[in-house]
Image (cartoon, rainbow, N blue to C red):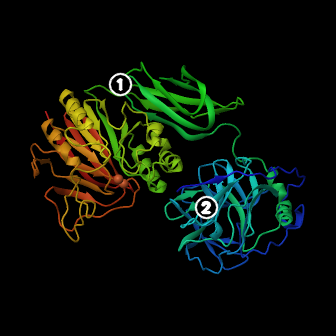
Amino acid sequence: MAKTWVKVGGAGACTVAVLAFLLNQSTSAAPKPDLKPSAHWVFDADAVAGKTVTDRAGKLTGTLLGAPALVTESNAGAYLHLTGPDDGVMIKTRVAPDAPFLPKEALSVVAWVRVDEPTEWTGVLGCFQDNGPAETGFIVGTNKKKFFFGLSTKGADDGDGKMTYLESKSEFARGRWHHIAAVYDGKQMQLFVNGQLDSTSTEQSGPVLYSKSAPLVIGRYKDDNEDYPLHGAIKEVLLCPHAIAADQVTSHFQADKALVDVPSVVPEGPRFVVEPYLQYVTRTGITVMWETEDPCTAVLEYGTALPAKQQVKVEKPDTMGEVALTGLEPNTKYFYRVVCQDAQGRKLEGKPLTFMTAPGSNDAFSFTVIGDTQRNPVVTGKVAKLMWERRPNFVVHCGDVVDDGASKAQWTGDLFKPCHELFGRVPVFPCIGNHEKDHPHYYKYFSLPKPEYYYSYTYGNAEFFVLDTNSKRNLKSDGEQYKWLEKALAASTAKWKFCYHHHPAYCSDDDDYGNTWKGSSTYGDVRVRNFVALYEKYKVDVVFNGHVHVYERTWPIREGKVDQKNGIVYVTSGGGGGGLENFAPTPPFFKQQFRSDFHFCYANIHQGTFDLKAFDQEGRLFDQFTIKKD
Ligand SMILES: [Fe+2]
Ligand SMILES: [Fe+2]
């Protein structure tokens, strides 16, 4: 996605004071004009039946996605409440450019919308593709706290389509109703907010340019490679194959203008974009992080009892918060709470949370393993809940934490949001996968010892060595990581040694390392296998990886053979949400247990006993193994 923005002149959006509060046709402030739409979706009990949404003007029946609620309130009337990560309304999954219901020469989209949680990209109504430089169709939505009207036309076509994102000058009020109208007459784009012209652009001209296929969707910013929900509410959406006159827009707004005076459904003041979460716990320290919508100062309260008496102040206003606590008691439960304050002095009080410092080498502890959460918040949420129910001491993430490291919406909406309860109480130790694209977001959201892309940590009697196995790193014996790993493994006195990285040294995948249905495979990443010599030399116990979206546990391997006595077990755990993969038709020499399903692993260690269990997304145990040593 390469988005270009235009910011242009126009009348400012204004809030119109109204007297009437009752909202229905008979008591409206003004008669509602007939905008002659080709499609008109109204979210009320007459139109929504089960999963079906009737089109009052045409034949574009919609289907509810996820589980949005149809709500009726005395002051706002009926609306569709969109709260879940997969909520929305699918009108058509694939629309061809010559579909008769698509506006061609001109178009208007009119809607009553409420955004409760502003995020990076949301959609009100769209039929578009924005895939790298290829940009086609139209989309009306929001970006952070502004509305936008995206349009691609034949007049501005640069070969594969060029979209103009016309952004509203004014910010919308979170949790309050807004009337928006996006109008295009073949020469000019106009964006109206609450009946007033807000912004215009003449960058586009001529007929709308559509791709070969695009979905027509309400309540999501959705094309072939992006899919983000709107968190809020929609009352009605109209699609017109013509440009609506400005006075018609105003009249349409006026008819239900009492909606803009309905109080906000969300509290005023600062808001967490990412709720507080934990990083890099040791016996005497831990790092607490969070992100707010606007810059805030903060106080981190912590202590071994409530109310927590110790404090760390963050005096410099920022959207990212990061406090490294030191001098803590080992193996001890702490309470903590983040209290933020914005420039207006408004406070945001996080809920009291807990963490546990690392135990000593004789104490029992547990951790969970997940990989490849990517962009599937429903499954990631299910797996995160199951992990939290096990009350692990920490979480190992085997990389591909998001699907596109450059997409902030994926970090906030697809990773941290479904994992917030777990990550707020259990520190996560990640490794970087290929889908993060080495983007600064990885280094912004995770706080790890420098140089961050590789690091190690000790927990109880175990030491964990974390590597970056992406191709931009030199993984050979003269590379930085190899040299570091050799030194670190040689120096380690830990009873248990675990390594993890994203790509597998060994796996039974069918097509990542050669198409096994048609030819041969290396059954793993040969670049990563360079590290195996070190694993074997320094007696690493288990190696974890993700990348292949399955579960697999190998027989213990040493020197390219199964060696039950001295071999190393390799565990692939890539079942956190990314699309599931398949296995080769014939088994490689190391194959022992595998399963293609969403899952997580749960490991327990006490002194010389290591036990690992694998659970599927329903919490059903499907594999277990134990290693014992003196
Ligand atoms: Fe992946
Ligand atoms: Fe991957």
Kindly identify which residue carries mark 2. 163
Residue 183 occupies quadrant: bottom right
The crowding category of the residue bearing disc 1, from other C-alpha atoms within 10 Å (few below 14, some 14 to 19, many at least 20), is: many
**Dot 2 amino acid type:** Met
Element marked by disc 1:
loop
Residue 250 occupies quadrant: bottom right
The crowding category of the residue bearing disc 2, from other C-alpha atoms within 10 Å (few below 14, some 14 to 19, many at least 20), is: many
Q: Does any atom of ligand 1 lie closer than 8 Å to the CB of label 2?
A: no
Q: Does any atom of ligand 2 lie closer than 8 Å to the CB of label 1?
A: no
**Nearer to the camera, 31 or 15:** 15
**Nearer to the camera, 628 or 498:** 498
Q: Position of residue 506 (x, y in %)?
A: 21, 53
Q: Position of residue 224 (x, y in %)?
A: 50, 65
For the C terminus, the image quarter is top left
**Nearer to the camera, 606 or 16:** 16
Please report the residue visible at 37 percent of the width from the left and 30 percent of the height from the top.
449
Q: How many numbered marks appear?
A: 2
Q: Earlier in the sequence, mark 1 or mark 2?
A: 2
Give me the disc on residue 283.
Answer: 1
Element marked by disc 2:
strand
Camera-side mark, 1 or 2: 2
